[in-house]
Image (cartoon, helix red, strand yellow):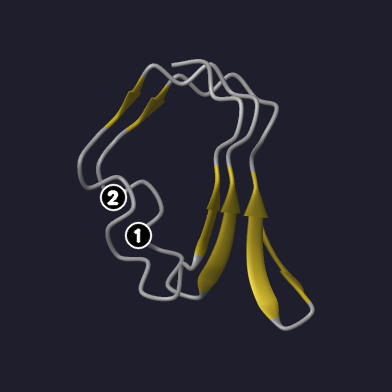
């Protein structure tokens, strides 16, 4: 889910059961500026998982369980 807050496009998908982030996972969200992935049991992130996010300037991934 992407929502607009204070003029920024934010996606908070923390606290889910995400274990794998494949290539181009977020490529349809070109306006996304902040992505929160905290508290997910992520085991693998592909090299181009965040490709296609020209405006992404904040990636929050604290406490990932790699």
Residue behind mark 2: 24
Q: Secondary structure at mark 1?
A: loop
Q: Is residue 17 visible?
A: yes
Could you tell me if the residues under marks 2 and 1 are in contact, i.e. CB atoms within 8 Å? yes
Residue tagged 1: 27
Residue 65 falls left or right of residue 8: left
Alpha-carbon distance for marks 2 and 1? 5 Å
Is residue 52 depicted above or below 44 in this figure? below
Q: Position of residue 17 (x, y in %)?
A: 59, 19
Q: Which mark is residue 52?
A: none
Query: Could you say whether the residue bearing mark 2 is in a helix, strand or loop?
Result: loop
Is residue 1 among what the camera can see?
no
Badge 1: how crowded within 10 Å, few (<14), some, or many (20+)? some
Q: In screen coordinates, is 64 left or right of 8?
A: left
* Residue 31: x %, y % from top left: 50, 76
Instruction: Examine the image and state in which quarter residue 63 appears.
Output: top right
Find the residue positioned furthest to the front.
62
Q: Residue at x 30, y 45 (%)?
A: 49
Report the quarter where the C terminus lies.
Answer: top left
* Image location of residue 43, percent across then percent down: 39, 16
> Is 56 located above or below residue 66 in the figure?
below
* Residue 54 in picture, x, y percent from top left: 36, 74
| 34, above or below 17, in the image | below
Looking at the image, the residue that sits furthest to the left is 47
Which residue does the image show at 70% across and 27% down from the upper left?
15
Residue located at (58% from left, 38% from top): 37
Quadrant of residue 23 within the rendered picture: top left
């Amino acid at each position: 889910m992407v929502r607009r807050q204070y003029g920024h496009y934010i996606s908070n998908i923390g606290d889910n059961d995400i274990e794998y982030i494949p290539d181009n996972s977020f490529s349809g969200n070109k306006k996304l500026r902040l992505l929160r992935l905290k508290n997910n049991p992520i085991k693998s992130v592909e090299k181009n998982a965040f490709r296609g996010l020209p405006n992404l300037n904040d990636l929050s991934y604290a406490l990932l369980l790699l």
